[in-house]
Each structure stands twice: as structure tokens, then as C-alpha cells.
Amino acid sequence: MTPLAIGGVICKNNLALAPMAGITDSPLRALCLRGGAGLVCAEMVAAPGIQHGNPRTGRMLKLDYGEHPCAMQIFGGDDAAVACAVAAAKREGADIIDINAGCPVPKIVKAGAGIALMKDEAAFARMIAAAVKAAGATPVTVKTRVGLRQGEVLSVKLARIAEGEGAAAVFLHGRYASMAHAGPLDCEAMSATAAAVKIPVIGNGGVCGSATAAEVLKTGCAGVMIGRAAIGNPFIFEQICAELSGAAYQPLDARSRARIFLELLDMCVLRYGPRTGLNRSRKTAGYFITGFPNCAAVRTRFMGIDNHEQARRYLAAALH
Ligand SMILES: Cc1cc2nc3c(=O)[nH]c(=O)nc-3n(C[C@H](O)[C@H](O)[C@H](O)COP(=O)(O)O)c2cc1C
């Protein structure tokens, strides 16, 4: 795979882990880098929380497992709050700072963030400019969508604005906001966007293997961003790299993937402490513990154990 350059950050390949709230925390990012990702993107972090010194929000900026290169994603509707969060993310060692301009969740949009920025070009431009200024030499990127409603392409214009304001790349979800996370990508809109700017456009949406990754790359996008398909399978990046370069690849079987979950559990406990760590790991248990006989029973039993040590012992024995 071709390396991807985002500003001065050179990623070893052009496959990135997508930001996913409640999912792509430090432990999962570290596993995905081990699984071959060229870049990992953190779950979105609320700019006002950073500006007001909320300790839980501040904790989200920490790269506990030294996971690099990492893009820290910030969302907010106020330039000053976003600038403050960008500066904090930079201090914590983020390699890239991404601005969320694609989230359709009503609470986020009401705050003037996410897709609210797609609806207001001036605010979008101001936000990127404020982030670029606060980030200094750290590259700023923006994650957005092809448009709000099917057929009404906005990303060509938005990518040009982002480039004009100093953004170093665009992460482009090829679905319209009205489609949320399901349905086909608008590959024509993705092609037009990639062709409209000199900065890299990294395509996203529905990639679950080398065939779908190749389709995204065919649009002219410089890279591919993978979300849900990486949650229970951090080695998907290695697999896609191998298959796209024509090498044979033996994917992990379902039990081996489930055993990776044990590592994730330990990393979550180290990061959050036993109780919160166990709860946090449960968010992804359904993605990892699947695809083998008896997996539903193993999952159910694991979810019912409240003590980290016991849960770990049970899983280790069940997945032996
Ligand atoms: C549970 C979940 C949380 C998400 N959180 C974020 C987020 O914090 N920031 C963001 O830009 N996109 C977020 N997304 C969107 C993903 O980054 C990605 O664009 C979307 O899942 C499509 O990619 P996929 O089909 O490969 O999953 C989220 C998606 C999911 C499923």
C-alpha cells in the first residue's frame, strides 16, 4: 500500500481507523495499529468540555498506549472552544487534529457542530481557520460527508474551503447525512471531491475487506478509512494491505479474534480501573466474541460477571 502523507505526518500505509464515539479509545487504537492501521482516529472529544476543564473530557485526549500516528477528533460549534481543545490535544501529543463536520446526532448539531458546519460554509471556514491557527505545525483535517440529502453534493465545495483554510486532508464519508450509517456510497461525489483538491481525500463508508477498499480507492481517494469492520477485527488493516498487494493472507479465525478481546479487556482495566474498564470493554464484546459455536452463550455469561478478575478467568477458560 502507498504511504499516506498528511501534512508532515507520514503514515506507513493509507488505511485509517475511523473515529467512533465510545469505541475508538486508546486500547482499541493501540490494537488497530498493531493490526496494521497506518493511522488511527480517536473518538470525538467535546470542545466545551476541554474549555471548561472537565476532567473526564480531558482524560479522553490521553494517548495511554503511545498510539501513533493518532488523529484526535474535536467537535464544537464555537471557534474559541474548538481552538482551546485543539491546543490541548496538541499538548497531549496528537499527531493530527481532526474537526468533526459530519456527525448528524441532534445534540451535536444543536450545538452548532457536526453537520451544522456543513450547512454554514462561513462557520465551516471559520472553524477550520481557528483550528489551523491553534494547531501550529500540527496538521488539521476535517471529517465530513458528501452532502446532507441524497444527490445534493456539498463535499466538493467544502473540501475546497478546507484546503483554502489550511487543512491537510479531508476524511470523506461517502454517505449523505440523511442516510446515517447505512446504504451505498456516492462514489461519483467522492471522485469529484478527490479531484477538486490537492490535499489527500480519504474515503470512508462500508469498507469490510479488500474488495470494498479497492472500490473506494478507485474513486481517486488517497486512502481508506474503516469503522465498524475494524471493531472486532483489528487485523483487518493487515489483511487488506496484503490482499491489495496480491499477497496471500490467512485471516485469524473467530476464536483467535475473541482471544484478542482478552487483551483489550486488560488494557481497558489498566486505563480506566477495574469497574469502568470492564464496563467499557463490554461495548465491543459483541464484535469480538462472535462467529464460533457457543459464542452467544460465552458472551452472555461474560456480560453477567461483574468482577474483572472473574470475567477474565471465565473468558480465558472459555476461549482456550
Ligand atoms: C458507534 C459509532 C460511533 C461513531 N462516532 C463517530 C465520531 O465520534 N466521529 C465521527 O466523525 N464519526 C463517527 N462515526 C462514524 C464513523 O466514523 C464512520 O464514518 C461510519 O461508521 C462509516 O464507516 P463504516 O461504514 O466503515 O463503519 C461513528 C460511527 C459509529 C457506528
Image: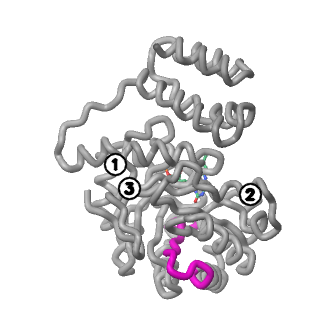
- Whether tag 1 and tag 3 are in contact, CB under 8 A, the answer is no
For the residue labelled by badge 3, is the local secondary structure a helix, a strand or a loop?
loop
Drawn side of residue 179 relative to residue 69, left or right = right
**Magenta region includes residue 138:** yes
| Residue position marked by numbered label 2 in the rendering | 57
For the residue labelled by badge 2, is the local secondary structure a helix, a strand or a loop?
helix
Q: Which mark is residue 38?
A: 3
- Residue type beneath disc 3: Gly
Task: Residue at 32% x, 59% y: name it.
Answer: 12
For the residue labelled by badge 1, is the local secondary structure a helix, a strand or a loop?
helix
Q: Which mark is residue 212?
A: 1
Among the 4 quarters of the image, the one containing residue 1: bottom left
- Residue type beneath disc 2: Thr
Asked if residue 162 shows in the view, the reply is yes
Disc 2 to disc 3, how far (Cα)?
26 Å
Tell me if the residue at label 2 has its CB under 8 Å from ligand 1: no
Task: Residue at 45% x, 76% y: name it.
Answer: 168
Task: Residue at 44% x, 28% y: name it.
Answer: 257
Task: Residue at 32% x, 44% y: name it.
Answer: 238
- For the rendered model, the colour scheme is one colour
Q: Position of residue 141 (x, y in %)?
A: 51, 72
74 and 264: which is toward the camera: 264
Q: Earlier in the sequence, mark 1 or mark 3?
A: 3
Give neighbour class at mark 1: few <14, some 14-19, many 20+ (Cα, 10 Å): some
Magenta-tinted stretch: 132-148
- Residue type beneath disc 1: Thr
Disc 1 to disc 2, how far (Cα)?
35 Å
Disc 1 to disc 3, how far (Cα)?
18 Å
